[in-house]
Image (cartoon, rainbow, N blue to C red):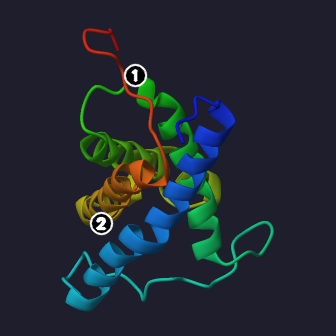
Amino acid sequence: MASNNPGLLALRGFIAGALATLIFHQAAWEVLHLLDVPGLGMPAPFPMAPTHPFGVPRIASLAFWAGIYGAIFALLTRRIHTPLWLAGIALGVVAGLTSGLIVSPFRGDPIAFGGSAYGLARSMIINGFWGLGVGLILPLLGRVPRPAAGEPA
């Protein structure tokens, strides 16, 4: 059933973002972990270390914040003219850059991955796959409003 309810659309976006973390994000993380390429290696996926300040497992925190991004993405779909999978990859790039430039300094980590091209590459790979997942999962959860032909962005 089609729905133009923004709350329902945001909820589906949240679910898509969280699921994409558990499936696509962590799959990319696992590939980097298994390949163990110098500079691109990652610890094991599904990190359970507690996060600050509430002590929730890191994977739960990642899924929650990915859900927030997914909800915003879903609410913007009416303005997205490109295929959702492609827009999702762009979402992943935005999320990765936000993490490196804004979130990391708040956590006390170095800004911009400490200037590491490897850190940037890891972030773009993992978050790009996550965004691809959001773009693929969201339409599976229900109708996604899209711009009408000729409608400006």
Residue position marked by numbered label 2 in the rendering = 122
Earlier sequence position, callout 2 versus callout 1:
1
Residue extending furthest toward the front: 1
Quadrant where the C terminus is found in the figure: top left
Instruction: Say which of marks 2 and 1 sits in front.
Output: 1
Q: Nearer the viewer, residue 132 or 52?
A: 132
Residue extending furthest toward the right: 54
Left or right, residue 55 beside residue 51 = right
Q: Position of residue 17 (x, y in %)?
A: 50, 56
Image point (33%, 65%), residue name = 126
Q: How many marks?
A: 2
Left or right, residue 59 beside residue 73 = right
- Disc 1 marks which amino acid? Arg
Assign a secondary structure to mark 2. helix
Q: How far is the residue under mark 2 from the one under mark 1? A: 29 Å
Assign a secondary structure to mark 1. helix
Is the Cβ of the residue at disc 2 closer than 8 Å to that at disc 1?
no
Image point (54%, 83%), residue name = 47
- Residue 79's disc number: 1
Mark 2, residues whose alpha carbon is within 10 Å: few (<14), some, or many (≥20)? Answer: many
Image point (73%, 68%), residue name = 52
Q: Position of residue 89 (x, y in %)?
A: 29, 48
Q: In this rendering, is residue 57 above or below 142?
A: below
Q: Which of 79 and 146 is in front in this view?
A: 146
Left or right, residue 117 beside residue 79 = left
